Amino acid sequence: YLGDTEFVNIYSTSIASLSEINYIEKDSLSESISPVYYDNYKADNAEGLLSKGNLYIDGTVTLADIDMVSDQNDTLTLSTWYSIDADHSSVPRFHITMLDDKQNTVSDIHYRDLDMKRMEVINNWVQIKRDVIIPSNAYKLKWTVSAEKLYMDHTLVTSYDQLFWSPLSDNYIIYNHYIAQLKPSKLDTEN
């Protein structure tokens, strides 16, 4: 630990630990739990983050509109990845609204990347992730983003501490809200 500012914690690390690759063995993974919501935007047929899809944002777009269920965990984890073109894109602003059974607002959360203490980065893609405590009287969650000329991928909502994973291209998986590399099989290492 080196220090912090209002928005960032600063740490140092060695080049050796930065170069280290931690693989996940697919055969040792426990069964994937169905997420509350997941979209990799494959239908849009455009290049995404290790996938064949992305969502183009130019205005305000609903990322997820979720009806709460009685057996759902009281905390949800929401994450998405975005790629900004520094010359054209704006910084995304996120909004989570939770409504009761009469459509009254019971929680209203606004956030953006400055509110995050830790972010994952892969090439020019950045993940923004947030845990949200669900009030007992919430019946619906609506998650929106506002931005200009922004690309998003892998929008995921899970119950807190429940493992969801799904294969991506190039021997990667989305694993518990992160992008991870699978351990090469013997066949892969022989070629």
Image (cartoon, rainbow, N blue to C red):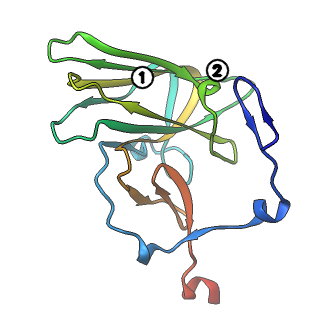
Q: Quadrant of residue 113?
A: top right
Q: Is residue 173 visible?
A: yes
Q: Residue at x 42, y 22 (%)?
A: 144
Q: Quadrant of residue 30?
A: bottom left
Identify residue type, mark 2.
Answer: Ser
In the displayed orientation, state which residue is furthest to the top. Answer: 104
Identify residue type, mark 1.
Answer: Thr
Report the Cα–Cα distance between label 2 and label 1: 15 Å
Closer to the camera in the image, 61 or 25: 25
Q: Is residue 191 visible?
A: no
155 up-or-down from 87: above or below: below
Horizontal and vertical percent position of residue 151: 56, 33
Check the picture and name the quadrant holding the C terminus.
Answer: bottom right
Apparent side of residue 18 relative to residue 191 in the rendered image (left or right): right
Horizontal and vertical percent position of residue 164: 37, 55
Residue 144: assigned label:
1
| Residue to which mark 2 is pinned | 90
Q: Residues within 10 Å of mark 2 (few under 14, many from 20)?
A: some
Mark 2 or mark 1, which has the lower sequence index?
2
